[in-house]
Amino acid sequence: MLKPSETVLVVVDVQGKLARLMYNSEAMHQQLITLISGARIFDIPILWLEQLPDKLGPTSEELRLVLEGFSPIPKEHFSGWACDEFQQALNNTGRKQVLLCGIETHICVYQSCRDMLDNGFDVHLVADAMGSRTAENKALGLQMMGEAGAKLTNVESLLFELQHHAVGDSFRALLKLIK
């Protein structure tokens, strides 16, 4: 089971014009907003990656708004793990459960996932908060990561799993968020 005290959210490369080219981009952006907002309810650390931001542009504006207070980590490799700053930030959280989301599912998300799995992290793929330019590439990316040992989930399932108990302030905040 996912536990807020053991979990970190990793947002991969939802930037520039490329983010708008994802299959079903608007729905993906809405799920990302819900996921990030939910992570904030549970005080889950958020690590936010940007691939070559000087070339690909910044993270989508609506996501930057909900990521306020966090700073992006720029990277050059497809895998976030290849970035020392990201590795250090992830290890510094002391958490081993990773909620993984972003773009593109079959490239940067996939390579980041494989590297985190290879380094002992328990990776949970937030499928409805990921995207690729085609539905087929997204599906294949999810399949490849699942076969490598990552677990598949979605925004609502994981938020209620983190909540675990249908009472309290966080439960009321969660209900407002998903309605």
Image: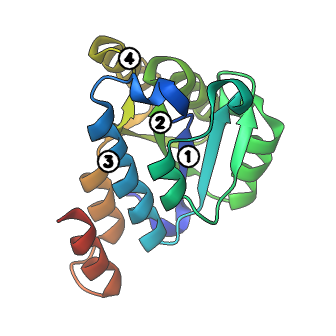
Whether residue 76 appears in this view of the structure is yes
Q: First in sequence: mark 1 or mark 3? A: 1
Crowding at label 2, few (<14), some or many (≥20) Cα neighbours within 10 Å?
many
Between the residue at mark 4 and the residue at mark 2, the CA separation in whole angstroms equals 12 Å
At numbered mark 4, what does the secondary structure look like: helix, strand or loop? loop
Which of the labelled discs sits on residue 133, or is there none? 4
Q: Position of residue 91 (x, y in %)?
A: 73, 51
Q: Residue lying farthest left? A: 179
Q: Nearer the viewer, mark 1 or mark 3?
A: 3
The residue positioned 75% from the left and 57% from the top of the image is 92
- 59 w.r.t. 162: above or below: above
Q: Nearer the viewer, mark 4 or mark 1?
A: 4
Q: Nearer the viewer, residue 151 or 137?
A: 137
Q: Which residue type does callout 4 highlight?
A: Arg
At numbered mark 1, what does the secondary structure look like: helix, strand or loop? strand
- 69 w.r.t. 145: above or below: below
Q: Which residue type does callout 1 highlight?
A: Val
Q: Which residue type does callout 2 highlight?
A: Gly
The residue positioned 59% from the left and 52% from the top of the image is 96
Tag 2 and tag 1, C-beta contact below 8 Å: yes
Residue indicated by mark 2:
102
Q: Nearer the viewer, mark 4 or mark 2?
A: 4
Residue indicated by mark 3:
31
Whether residue 8 appears in this view of the structure is no
